[in-house]
Image: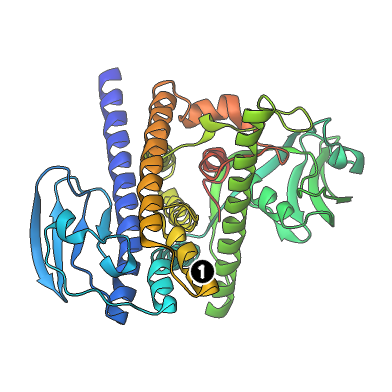
Amino acid sequence: MPFAFSLHEFFLQFLAILIMLAVLTILIIVHECGHFSVARLFGFQTPVFGFGLPFFGPSWVLGRKWGTEFRLHALLIGGYVAIPELNDESSAEQAFNVQLKPLKKFPIWQRALVAFAGPGFNIIFAYFIMMAMLVLLGEPIQSTFVYSLPKENPIAANAGILPKDQLLTINGEFVSSPSDAVTILSGHKNEEVKIDVKRTINGVEQQLSFSMNTNDAGKVGMGLAGQGPITYHKAEGNYSNIFVLTAKKLWFWTYSMIDAAGQLFSGLGAHIFHNGKNASGQAVPGFQDIHGVLGVIKIGSEITRQDWNQVFLFTVLISLDLAIVNLIPFPPLDGSHLAFMAYEAVFRKPVNQRVQGEMIKWGTVTLLFLMALISVNDISAWMTGKLDLKHNRSEKDKEKEIESTKSPNKTNVKAAPELQHAP
């Protein structure tokens, strides 16, 4: 019954997309609740808290509390909070049609905490979601195998690693996925590491150990792939051990995402100045590997359809991604406000209001332009099937090498068939 099958697939795809939209909206609301809560704590004005995107369709007033008007917008994606005294909503009276009290001048440390509270809440939210996942569901585990040994980096090959070896531990740390192996090794740059593998010799499985030194990027030259079903291993031990384990995994993935973002920017530079290749002549990721909201929704829905449990890990990674991106010192992101405050703290005077306003204005225009370009990139990748996990399995999973450089979102795509975003 092909029609029934296709209808079933359509329903699952539609449901998965709705779940991803809900996850993104919740994470943005959590972010804005961070700004709102700390702003209210210090007495900042918060004239409007909106659920959804403003200026697109009708809106309704849900109520007024704590000097804040809560609004519900027809396009219920994301949210926002107006904080005039943080200098990002100085035109709140005109933009949101509200009456403001005279603006106060708050200490730098209070304004900095308000600006950081959004990303901070995303980090805290990711921590508790991950801890709940480890306790209730467990950590996703998938066997990790070596499928190739690139000649460009023969460290692992010279140490004795062979294709089809199954990675067990690295420096005593259990390898739960290819992405996990990448994360562990990237934390041991220019260091000796011990890799335990399982190898089948004459039909008999044997456990072998190999020692080698990573290069300055924390890489040893192994192409990795996940094979077999995904299983879950619940965290064991008392609550203090689980707290520490959660923090450790969150730190590993945060580090990995920041490192991947740096490699992506380096790759963009290589595309501009070196025809898309690094010093070794290898192709590096470019603008086509950057994905935005549409890409995230598609990738997340594909992951969710294959294993609905993976929505937990996806939520953790996107929450971390929101925190990292918003801390970039680029107007009008939260990081730019922190940069302005750092300037004020060092030079004992605020940035000129006119200069700051122009920077925020043109930064916003630039950001919207980049978002539009990325959306076109997302649509193109979506229409050509480049965001489908089946496509990535057949054509791109074999590129999952420790030598490769991927953006955070691209790393998510790779990890999905193997681990689906282990933190």
Q: Quadrant of residue 189?
A: bottom right
Is residue 241 positioned above or below 255 on the image? below
Disc 1 is placed on an element classified as helix
On screen, 26 above or below 160? below
Q: Nearer the viewer, residue 420 or 386?
A: 386
Q: Is residue 416 above or below residue 68?
A: above
Q: Read off the residue under disc 1.
A: 342
Left or right of 215 on screen, residue 81: left
Direction from residue 27 to residue 99 in the image, left or right: left
Category of crowding for the residue at label 1, using alpha-carbon neighbours closer than 10 angstroms: few (below 14), some (14–19), many (at least 20):
some
In the rendered view, would you say 52 is above or below 18? below
- x, y percentage for residue 200? 81, 39
Please indicate whether residue 65 sits to the left or right of residue 163 in the image. left
Quadrant location of the N terminus in the rendered image: top left
Position of residue 87 measured from the top left corner of the image (x, y, whole percent)? 32, 64
Residue placed most toward the observer, 149 or 380: 380
Residue 398 visible within the image: no
Residue at (12% x, 63% y) in the render: 98
Residue 76 shows up from this direction = yes
Most extreme residue toward the top is 2
The residue at 42%/37% (across/down) is 370
Horizontal and vertical percent for residue 271?
Answer: 63, 29
Which image quadrant: the C terminus?
bottom right
Viewer-proximal residue, 90 or 131? 90
Q: Residue at x 43, y 72 (%)?
A: 112
* Residue 75 position within the rendered picture, expressed as x and y whole percent measured from the top left: 19, 45
